[in-house]
Amino acid sequence: MKKTVACLLAFFAALSLLPAAALADSFHPDDISTPHVVLMEASSGTVLYEKGGRDRAFPASTTKIMTCILAIESCPDLDVMVTVGDTVETRGSTMGIVRREELSLRSLLYGMMLVSGNDAAKAIAEHVSGSESAFAELMNQKAAALGMTGTHFVKSNGLHNDDHYSTAYDMALLTRYALQNEEFCKIVSTPYYDVPPTNKDSDGYQLGNTNKLLYTKPDETENFEYRYATGVKTGDTDQAGRCLVASAKKDGVELIAVLFGDPQGSSGRNPRFINSAKLFDWGFDNYGALDASDLGLEIDFTFPIAGSDLAELTARADLSGAVITDTKEKLAAIKSNSAGITAQTALTRKLEAPIAEGEVIGTVAYQYESATLFSVDLVASQAVSAAPADATPHPSASPLITGVPGGDGDEKGGGSSLVFWLILVVVLLLLVFVAKVIATKRRRRRIARKRRAYRSNYTRR
């Protein structure tokens, strides 16, 4: 009886789980009502899902992703002290800095990215470029370089301006680029940051990240924490709605989710966190990553080289960090048929010495079923020196002599000279022999002609 009851309880427990599992299996990104959505694989830039991703939208404070990476690249020393200007931005969210306050660039970056400080963004822009307008020019130059064709920046903080816009796809491109910077990754993945005391604040204070995917505050009743989350930035304005650029990493696959334009209303700020987590789960369930170095690919290639004693240069494909991202079914097919992967090399410089070891000389594109899986650098496996200039021969030297007795390495030079004289004697003897043979043949022909002439005269008589 007890066994029967236990089995029934287990059956009903399993049955109660079926609806949840069925719901999880039936989810598709199209179910999300957010108007602008992009899910991108970070290492390759492959778009796994897109809805309205190229349509113009207002990015709000996700703009600060650009401000952050530009500041890090422009000022590598994040501990440099910054003096806040005479005008401080007070609109929207702020970190609370005041006029003429002195604090590190690092603190301003954390204040901008964690609590979305509009005041911090303005101070950073003025520190880097002297003014917000000059910094906006720098932002647009960077956007163009990254291929963000649907973007135009006016403000460093993202406060609304009709001429300040972007797209979900462009912001995914920007985030993919920024995530390659370790300092950026450290900042956007930090739940809390302690601002040290300043000349205007003797106590210092703590900042908490607005990205609920990263952690749950002790006083919050709802938990939106996502175990694989690594960043990045929230954004909120009346015109932009609720915005989120998020990143997550699982089993070597890193995904970027961009959600723009959720309306502000009774639903609050939380649907973007719920939807991004669903997007990530869907992406991780359907897509995977394959380390290229596990496929046994051809990596060594040889090329003829000019200006060197070497006839060929060996170069190697740098597969470090090369990852193939695709559906799990496609990755399984690639792995089982790695012999079907071909390599196409392309040189980016003239192969002429000198060449340094490790120097990039071209690229290698690996292809499967006529599609390029990935491309990597082709680097020289060895250093190649230029061939020495031809030495000017000694006036008394014969071009056949390979060594001079009495010079450096006399023993070697004497041996080479002896070989030369032996060869010369043999050549002379051969010449004498050939001359004798020729002379003998000529003498015999003359005698034969005389005999024929004598016989002819005798016959006529």
Image (tube, rainbow, N blue to C red):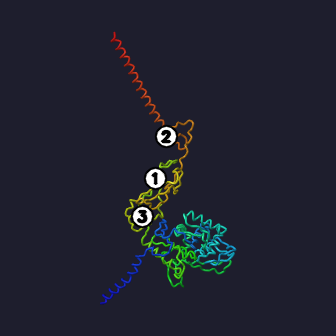
Location of the C terminus (image quadrant):
top left
Helix, strand or loop under label 3: helix
Q: Amino acid at mark 3?
A: Asp
User: Tags 1 and 3 in contact by the CB under 8 Å rule?
Assistant: no
Percent x, y for residue 448?
Answer: 37, 19
User: In the figure, residue 456 lies in which quadrant?
Assistant: top left
Amino acid identity at mark 1: Thr
Question: Where in the figure is residue 345, as x and y percent of width and height?
Answer: 46, 55
448 vs 24, nearest the viewer: 24
Label located before the other in sequence (1 or 3): 3
Residue that numbered label 3 is attached to: 294
- Give the foreground label among 1 and 2: 1
Position in image of residue 236 (x %, y %):
57, 76
Quarter location, residue 70: bottom right
- Dot 1 or dot 2: first in sequence order is 1
Q: Residue furthest left?
A: 1
Quarter holding residue 392: top right
Q: Nearer the viewer, residue 261 or 302?
A: 261
First reached walking from the N terminus: tag 2 or tag 3: 3
Per the rendering, the mark at residue 302 is: 1
Q: Residues within 10 Å of mark 3 (few under 14, many from 20)?
A: few
**Label 1 vs label 2: CA separation?**
35 Å
Q: Which residue is mark 2?
A: 416
